[in-house]
Image (cartoon, helix red, strand yellow):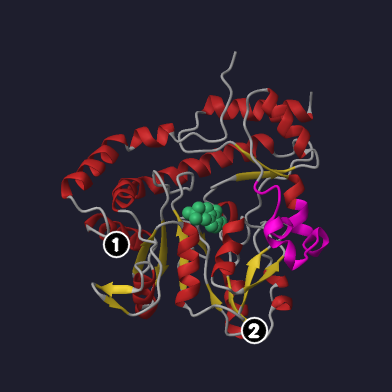
C-alpha cells in the first residue's frame, strides 16, 4: 500500500542544509547579537548578488516588503495602484496598507499572470504604480509592462514572492521595478524557518529610505528621518537563509525537471491544461498549476488516494469579504474567475521522489481514463 503524497514536504530540503542550519543558529546564539547584525547584512549582500541588484533590504515578511516598497515611492492615500486580479491577498493588502486604491486587471488566459493588453484601460490620472506578480513562479511579460509604465510615467513594484531566480528576456525578476519585494515564507522557493522578506533595488535613495522605513524610520541611532515601522529581518532567519540561498539554483533545477516530467506524462490527458510559458519568460515552478473543468472531482479523487493537492486560489481577492466594498463581480474578471474554478496545484517540491511523482501521474491519468 503506497503511503500517499503530500502537497509539499520541507523534510528533504531541511536535511540537505541541516548541518549549516544548526551551525548558523549556534553562530547567532554565540554572537549575542539578535537584531540587525552581521547575518542580516551578510544575507542582504548575498541576496543582492543573487538577484543582480545593487541593494537588498531584509524585512520581517513579504507583505511588509511590498508595503515599504510602495511607501518608499511615496504612494499613499488618493493614489491608485494596478494589481493583478489573479493573485493572493497580500499583494492587495499591501496596497491597502499604504491607503492607496486598488485597480485590478484580469489575467492572461495562458500564463495566468496580469494581462498587459488590459492594463491601459485601468489607468487613470491618479494611477501611480503597477504591481506585477510573477505568479506560480513564471515571470510576467515585463517588456510589455515596462513599455506601458514608461508611456504613462508609472512606477513598477514587482511582487517576486513566488519567483526567485525567474527571468524575462534574460533579466531576473526583482530587477525591473524601481523597487521590488519578495518573501521567504517557509514554503516559498527560498524559504526561512519562519517569516522573512526582502526589498531589492538599484536606486541608492530608495534603498536608504527603505532601510529607514523598516526600522522605525531610523538609519542612525536616535535619528529618525522618516515615520517608519518595525519590520526588520530577524538575525536568526537571515543566518538560516544564507546556506539555503547557495542551494537555490539546484533546487530550482529540480523543480523544473519535475515540471518537465509532469508535462511529458500529462499532456493530452483528459481536458487537462498544462502550464504555458510566455514568450521570453522563464518559470521556476513555485507551483505546478493545471486546469480542468472537472477540477473538484479530480481533487477529491486524488485525496481519496492520499494525494494532496491545493487550489491557488479558490477565492480571488476581488471575491473576498475584505474587498466586498469594491463591488466587483466574477464577470468583471472572467479569466481570473475561470482560473479560480478550474486551477489545481499538483504536488511538487525539491526532493520529491520519482516514485511519488509517478503515483501522482498514475492517478491523474486513472481519473481521466479509468
Ligand atoms: C507569499 C506571498 C506574499 C506575502 O508574503 P509573506 O511573507 O507571507 O508576507 C505576497 N505576494 C505573493 C504573490 C506571495 O506568494
- Place of residue 137 in the rendered image (x, y in percent of width and height, measured from the top left): 55, 53
Does label 1 point to a residue whose CB lies under 8 Å from ligand 1?
A: no
- Place of residue 253 in the rendered image (x, y in percent of width and height, measured from the top left): 46, 44
- Place of residue 28 in the rendered image (x, y in percent of width and height, measured from the top left): 22, 47
The prevailing secondary structure element of the residues shown in magenta is helix
Q: Which callout, 2 or 1, points to the residue nearer the camera?
A: 2
| Relative vertical location of residue 312 with respect to residue 147 in this rendering, above or below | above
Tell whether position 175 is magenta.
Answer: no
Which numbered dot is residue 174? none
**Nearer to me, 219 or 12:** 219
**Residue for point 64% across, 84% down:** 126
Q: Which residue is mark 2?
A: 126
- Residue farthest to the front? 222
Location of residue 117 (image quadrant): bottom right
Q: As drawn, is 10 to the left or to the right of 361?
A: left
**Residue for point 46% across, 70% down:** 69
- Residue farthest to the right? 331
Say which element carries label 1: helix
Q: Which residues are magenta?
A: 312-338
Image quadrant holding the C terminus, namely: top right
Pointer 1 local density, CA inside 10 Å: few below 14, some 14–19, many at least 20: some
Pointer 2 local density, CA inside 10 Å: few below 14, some 14–19, many at least 20: few
Q: Which residue is mark 1?
A: 45
Calculate the distance from the C-alpha at mark 2 to the C-alpha at mark 1.
36 Å
Image quadrant holding the N terminus, namely: top right
Q: Earlier in the sequence, mark 2 or mark 1?
A: 1
- Place of residue 30 in the rendered image (x, y in percent of width and height, measured from the top left): 16, 45
| Relative vertical location of residue 205 with respect to residue 265 in this rendering, above or below | below
Amino acid at each position: 500500500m503506497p503511503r500517499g503524497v503530500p502537497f509539499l514536504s520541507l523534510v528533504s530540503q531541511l536535511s540537505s542544509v541541516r548541518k549549516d542550519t544548526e551551525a548558523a543558529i549556534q553562530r547567532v546564539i554565540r554572537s549575542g547579537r539578535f537584531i540587525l547584525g552581521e547575518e542580516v547584512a551578510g544575507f542582504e549582500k548575498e541576496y543582492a548578488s543573487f538577484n543582480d541588484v545593487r541593494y537588498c533590504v531584509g524585512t520581517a515578511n513579504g507583505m511588509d516588503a511590498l508595503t515599504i516598497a510602495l511607501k518608499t515611492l511615496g504612494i499613499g492615500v488618493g493614489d491608485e495602484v494596478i494589481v493583478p486580479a489573479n493573485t493572493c491577498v497580500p499583494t492587495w493588502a499591501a496596497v491597502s496598507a499604504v491607503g492607496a486604491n486598488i485597480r485590478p486587471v484580469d489575467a492572461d488566459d495562458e500564463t495566468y499572470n496580469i494581462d498587459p493588453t488590459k492594463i491601459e484601460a485601468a489607468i487613470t490620472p491618479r494611477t501611480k504604480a503597477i504591481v506585477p506578480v510573477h505568479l506560480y513562479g513564471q515571470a510576467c511579460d515585463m517588456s510589455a509592462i515596462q513599455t506601458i509604465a514608461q508611456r504613462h510615467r508609472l512606477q513598477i513594484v514587482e511582487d517576486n514572492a513566488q519567483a526567485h531566480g525567474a527571468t524575462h528576456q534574460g533579466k531576473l525578476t526583482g530587477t525591473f521595478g524601481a523597487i521590488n519585494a519578495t518573501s521567504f515564507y517557509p514554503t516559498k522557493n527560498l524559504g526561512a524557518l519562519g517569516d522573512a522578506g526582502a526589498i531589492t533595488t538599484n536606486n541608492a535613495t530608495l534603498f536608504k529610505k527603505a532601510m529607514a522605513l523598516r526600522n522605525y524610520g531610523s538609519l542612525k541611532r536616535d535619528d529618525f528621518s522618516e515615520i517608519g515601522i518595525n519590520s526588520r529581518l530577524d538575525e536568526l532567519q537571515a543566518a538560516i537563509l544564507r546556506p539555503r540561498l547557495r542551494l537555490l539554483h539546484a533546487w530550482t533545477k529540480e523543480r523544473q525537471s519535475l515540471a518537465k516530467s509532469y508535462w511529458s506524462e500529462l499532456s493530452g490527458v483528459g481536458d487537462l491544461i498544462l502550464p504555458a510559458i510566455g514568450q521570453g519568460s522563464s518559470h521556476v515552478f513555485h507551483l505546478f498549476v493545471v486546469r480542468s473543468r472537472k477540477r473538484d472531482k479530480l481533487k477529491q479523487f486524488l485525496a481519496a488516494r492520499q494525494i494532496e493537492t491545493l487550489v491557488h486560489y479558490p477565492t480571488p481577492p476581488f471575491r473576498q469579504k475584505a474587498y466586498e466594498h469594491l463591488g466587483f463581480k466574477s464577470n468583471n474578471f472572467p479569466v481570473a474567475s475561470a482560473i479560480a474554478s478550474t486551477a489545481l496545484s499538483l504536488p511538487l517540491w525539491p526532493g520529491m521522489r520519482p516514485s511519488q511523482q509517478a503515483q501522482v501521474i498514475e492517478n491523474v491519468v486513472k481519473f481521466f481514463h479509468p
